[in-house]
């Protein structure tokens, strides 16, 4: 079992905006499970590289689809994986108090390439099911050749930090409240749309229930 | 004027997924203008750090709100700023051909802290107007003290690369098309919701038109 509290390390300690920080394992899981695209940061020749990629997870590990960043990840390479959901603009009376409502998780660790075919298959299953629950048992699974051509990274979920901001602006009880300006939150929501069939599909190919039922549901 | 074509450097050359790459300045601008949150990557003590933050731009520069990452950005520090819009899941017949429709811009360069008060004010205006057009002339602008307490980073828009994937899965004309499986795209869209007034607002405080008119409009 994963611990309920994430260990506090030098990397995950909240040195700023402490009130927004969380070390709750449940918060981390909720943020990871609400999305499927992360930003993976690596250091290449002393410079940072940040690439978007898809991920999945189990109780203890994060799986990442290989990307341009994988070239430099032969062994245990330090990475930072960040997942962010933007929930709205915080419109205060003063520009200074403007902000964003968001949920963000940052995972630090050493990523390694998965080489064992069974571990890779299990990781790809997590990744596929994370983005599209039900799809692993519907689509054709990877052949041995395809599996070999797939780069999968794995990273322990040990060192992570979470930041969450919710609610109204902070200047409602200060002198700026006298300005008579409107203040509040402009929410931003993300939702799944109407599935678009591949134009090359034969007519009347039925859409599977696990895809059809996502239409109109919220993401993030 | 900014050049129409982004210079191709070692960092922006598309070594992988070349068909998805673009060096069009118009594509870069469109991706930047469709969002307001980026992922800023820096190297801290040899390790990558990826933090979400807000940004704005002018013709030649990207402005970033200071963050925990700014502690290490005294002079010209190499950064990588990535902005990603996720447009949908690409559901192919085979797991191997699954993917994501997305638009992503990656900007490389040396970021510096803005210290000149006039430059900082101009940059904050870009940043504020980028997230909420009309807000700079509506909200109370920063005092000298607030301006000094704000960290703003600036980065030239010289070295950037863009990746875009659109459309149907790629396995509609291969042997997997015979499997009879549904394939297509499950679109993901982001939209502005109903503005939520700060509970501490006096009743009947009018909502300004530049905020009200965003309700229901698409973001990203």
Image (cartoon, coloured by chain):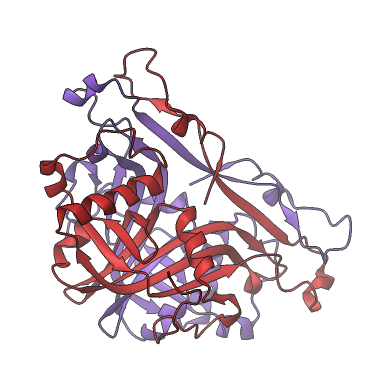
Chain colours: A red, B purple
Is residue B69 visible to the viewer in this orientation of the structure? yes
Q: Residue furthest top?
A: A203
What residue is at 48 percent from the left and 75 percent from the top? B119
The x, y position of residue B165, in whole percent, is: 30, 40
Q: Residue furthest right?
A: B203
- Between B140 and A78, the one lying in front of the other is A78
From the viewer's perspective, tell me whether residue B72 is left or right of residue B173: right
From the viewer's perspective, tell me whether residue A65 is left or right of residue B114: left
Is residue B51 visible to the viewer in this orientation of the structure? no
What residue is at 31 percent from the left and 18 percent from the top? A201
- Between B148 and A23, the one lying in front of the other is A23
- Between B107 and A89, the one lying in front of the other is A89
**Residue B92 occupies which quadrant of the picture?**
top left
The x, y position of residue A75, in whole percent, is: 15, 71
What residue is at 57 percent from the left and 68 percent from the top? A164
From the viewer's perspective, tell me whether residue B154 is left or right of residue A140: right
The x, y position of residue A88, in whole percent, is: 60, 57
Indicate whether B182 appears above or below A66. above
What residue is at 38 percent from the left and 71 percent from the top? A107
- Between B217 and B176, the one lying in front of the other is B176
């Amino acid at each position: 079992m994963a611990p309920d509290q994430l260990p506090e390390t030098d990397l995950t300690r909240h040195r700023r905006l402490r009130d927004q920080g969380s070390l709750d394992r449940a918060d981390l899981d909720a943020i990871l499970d609400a999305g499927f695209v992360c930003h993976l940061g690596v250091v290449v020749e002393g410079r940072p590289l940040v690439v978007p990629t898809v991920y999945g997870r189990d109780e203890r590990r994060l799986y990442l689809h290989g990307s341009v960043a994988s070239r430099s990840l032969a062994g245990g390479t330090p990475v930072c994986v960040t997942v962010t959901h933007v929930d709205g603009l915080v419109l205060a009376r003063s520009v200074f108090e403007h902000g964003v409502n968001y949920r963000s998780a940052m995972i630090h660790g050493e990523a390694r390439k998965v080489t064992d075919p069974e571990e890779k298959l299990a990781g790809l299953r997590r990744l596929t099911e994370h983005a599209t629950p039900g799809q692993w048992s519907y689509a054709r699974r990877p052949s041995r050749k395809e599996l070999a051509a797939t780069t999968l990274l794995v990273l322990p979920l040990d060192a992570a930090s979470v930041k969450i901001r919710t609610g109204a602006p902070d200047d409602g009880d200060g002198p700026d409240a006298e300005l008579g300006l409107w203040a509040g939150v402009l929410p931003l929501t993300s939702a799944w749309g109407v599935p678009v069939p591949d134009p090359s599909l034969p007519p009347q190919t039925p859409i599977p229930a696990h895809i059809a039922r996502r239409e109109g549901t919220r993401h993030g």
